[in-house]
Amino acid sequence: MSKTEDEITLKDTRVEYIFIDDIAKWANPSWSPMTEDEENELRMSLEDSGVLDPLTLSVGIWSRRIRLDEGNHRIWICPELKITKVPVIARVWNYCTFSNGNGDHSYDGDEIIKQEKEWLEKEYYCKPSDIIRKIQVASK
């Protein structure tokens, strides 16, 4: 049974720490603007506590597309703070776009390992390394 995004925590066994360089290629190149206060608040939170919520990579099994769905601000700010790896979970369905609220970016999914023979009736979550080839998993 899939969890809702709000229920996924760093303790979830499907969350893996991934080097930012391995997933930044799927980020929104023009992430939504933040006010200076919002950016400063996020930056301070990351400096004080690190990344508390996993980033979400959305993987489209049928569309063969990948995108960073949740975490587009963090993926660009973390390297400035010398954070090189982040917690990530993969959200899998037929298409990689669940919401265009944070952009309509998606990229060729040549690295997608799994192929479904049937149309998926329901999305599911998994470890990024279970669905995407050449993901380098890091220790916490």
Image (tube, rainbow, N blue to C red):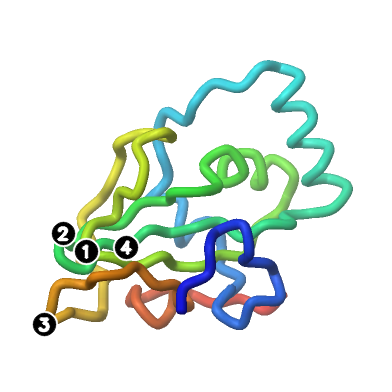
Q: Position of residue 18 (x, y in %)?
A: 56, 68
What amino acid is found at the position of numbered circle 4 in the picture? Val
Residue 94 got which mark? 1
Q: Marks 1 and 2: in contact by CB < 8 Å?
A: yes
In the rendered image, which residue does mark 3 sit on? Answer: 117
Nearer to us: label 2 or label 3: 3
Q: Which residue is mark 4?
A: 59
Identity of the amino acid at label 2?
Answer: Ser
Disc 2 is placed on an element classified as loop
> Residue at the right extreme?
48
Q: Are marks 2 and 3 in contact (CB under 8 Å)?
A: no
Type of amino acid under label 1: Asn
Mark 2–mark 1 Cα distance, whole angstroms, equals 6 Å
Question: Which mark sits nearer the N-terminus, 2 or 3?
Answer: 2
Q: Tag 3 or tag 4, which sits nearer the N-term?
A: 4
User: Dot 2 corresponds to which residue?
Assistant: 63
Q: In which image quadrant can residue 37 be found?
A: top right
Please tell me whether residue 116 is drawn above or below residue 62 in the rendered image.
Answer: below
| Residue at 41%, 65% in the rendered image | 91
The quarter holding residue 11 reads bottom right
For the C terminus, the quadrant is bottom right
Q: CA distance from mark 4 to mark 3?
A: 16 Å
Q: Residues within 10 Å of mark 2 (few under 14, many from 20)?
A: some
Residue 132, percent from left and from top: 34, 73
Which three-letter amino acid code belongs to the residue tagged 3? Lys
- Is residue 26 or residue 4 the one in the foreground? 4
Q: What distance separates the C-alpha of mark 2 from that of mark 3?
A: 13 Å
Other residues around mark 3 within 10 Å, as few (<14) / some (14–19) / many (≥20): few
Q: Which percent across, then down, holds residue 17?
A: 61, 71
Q: How much space separates mark 4 and mark 1, taking CA atoms?
A: 8 Å
